[in-house]
Amino acid sequence: MKKLLECFMMIIFLLFGYAGYSQSVESPYEVGTWLGFRSGAISYTFDDGSPNQFTKVIPMFNEFNFKLTLFTVTSPSWGWPANWTTLQSVASNGHEIASHTVSHPYLNTLKDSLQTVELKDAQDVINSHISGHQCITVAYPYCLGGNRTICEQYYIAARICSGNIESSTPSDFMYISSIICGTEGPVKTVKNFNDRANTAANSKGWCVYLIHGIDNDGGWSSLPADTLRGSLVYLSTYPDKFWVSSFGNVARYIKERNAVSVSELSNQDSTITVRVTDTLPDSVFNFPLTLRRPLPDEWPSAVVTQAGKPRYTRIVTVDTVQYIQFEAIPDSGDVLITKNNSTGIGKGTGVMVPAPMLWQNYPNPFNPNTTINFDLVKSERVTLKVFDVSGREVRTLLNDHLAVGHHSVLFRADKLASGVYFYMLQVPGFLLQRKMLLLR
């Protein structure tokens, strides 16, 4: 029954969009305009599948841990036919494999039945070849849309190339603007890239780059790989200013942000329970939002879990106020904010409270092994687990009763993809977590 209801909601959403959904956030909570309360969103999108997109661009983005979108033509007779094994590997690293139709036609010249074939069949082919991934966005060939009603049945957002920077909430998700890069567009240099990114950040907007060929590999409007790298170096220098993510994830975030409901269920001395929901179809809209609230008085720090899974948490200071900033996925269970006493200061007592310590892993970043150290002040049962950024448990390293003292655990990540992971130590009365980075 739940599955049928969600399918029905998905059909309604795709047919009518998210009009009528509205944000409802209880004070003192805030929801970030962009992930991490960053100033602007940046998406790099690549069309047609020219060779150097795979040999040069993908390794470059993996190095910076930035996610991109590959708009893919699915016809086997296309000039660069899709290599589904390679695309599966790309998707497994968190990049988006999206639709560029079946045969790259001028959609506006086709009758409705043929437009349906181009849009629906491309999506179906991608979904059938790429596991653990959904095709939810499309780029119109030649930037010319067709029958929008047909497109809306299958995709949550579609890209054109009108050269503008989008606002934090685009006026039309079926015509998202992008900026052409390379020899045929206005973005040719690192400075051109950086100027557009800063314009987006200054307006809290969304900048979408449209790229084809790389280093004269036969793709249209070729762009030097060194220029692309220079733009990524600049963005990586300001990690709290720019959110670099795929076209589909930014579209997801916007729609979830605008439809989210945040309410506080309970507020105790050492725990706060929060409910984060929306009315969007969970099968598609399952991307984390960033929220924050002031850190309670006399809380040294905090950790956040959702349905028992750790969520990325940090303490930030804004205009002298300290906030707990955390990520949560709507409709994925209640959020528990737990006071973290790892500094050893007890609430209101002024005395040292014995507490376990969880240290930063070393080395960090690492490839493929790293060591996690922790100290116990008494003999007790310990669990040590590793989670990915979505909160999915990837490894249980310990679940045992250990003696007092220092302990070291070797974490082998041989079969895991590059990216950010969290390790969480749980002992009676304490829940400690830290972040680590695996770089292949």
Image: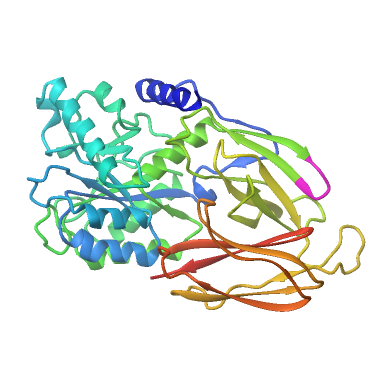
Q: Quadrant of the C terminus?
A: bottom left
Q: Is residue 127 above or below residue 213?
A: above
- Answer with left or right where residue 249 lies relative to residue 260: left
Q: Is residue 407 visible?
A: yes
Name the one closer to the observer, 334 or 193.
Answer: 334
Q: Main secondary structure of the magenta part?
A: loop
Instruction: State the residue at coordinates (77%, 75%).
Output: 403
Name the one closer to the observer, 39 or 326.
Answer: 326
Name the one closer to the observer, 341 or 221.
Answer: 341
- Reply yes or no: does residue 32 show up in magenta: no
Q: Which residues are magenta?
A: 267-271
Location of residue 184 in the rendering, given as x and y in whole percent from the top left corner:
14, 51
Location of residue 89 in the rendering, given as x and y in whole percent from the top left corner:
30, 58
Instruction: State the residue at coordinates (48%, 20%).
Output: 20
Name the one closer to the observer, 42 or 355.
Answer: 355
Q: Is residue 400 above or below residue 82?
A: below
- Answer with left or right where residue 242 lies relative to residue 228: right
Q: Is residue 36 above or below residue 166?
A: below
Q: Is residue 211 above or below residue 384?
A: above
Q: Quadrant of residue 31?
A: top right
Location of residue 245 in the rendering, given as x and y in whole percent from the top left corner:
39, 51
Instruction: State the residue at coordinates (56%, 77%).
Output: 362
Q: Quadrant of residue 17?
A: top left
Instruction: State the residue at coordinates (16%, 49%).
Output: 48
- Reply yes or no: does residue 268 show up in magenta: yes
- Answer with left or right where residue 258 lies relative to residue 146: right
- Answer with left or right where residue 326 lies relative to residue 88: right
Q: Quadrant of residue 102?
A: top left
Q: Is residue 139 visible?
A: no
Location of residue 101 in the rendering, given as x and y in whole percent from the top left corner:
18, 37
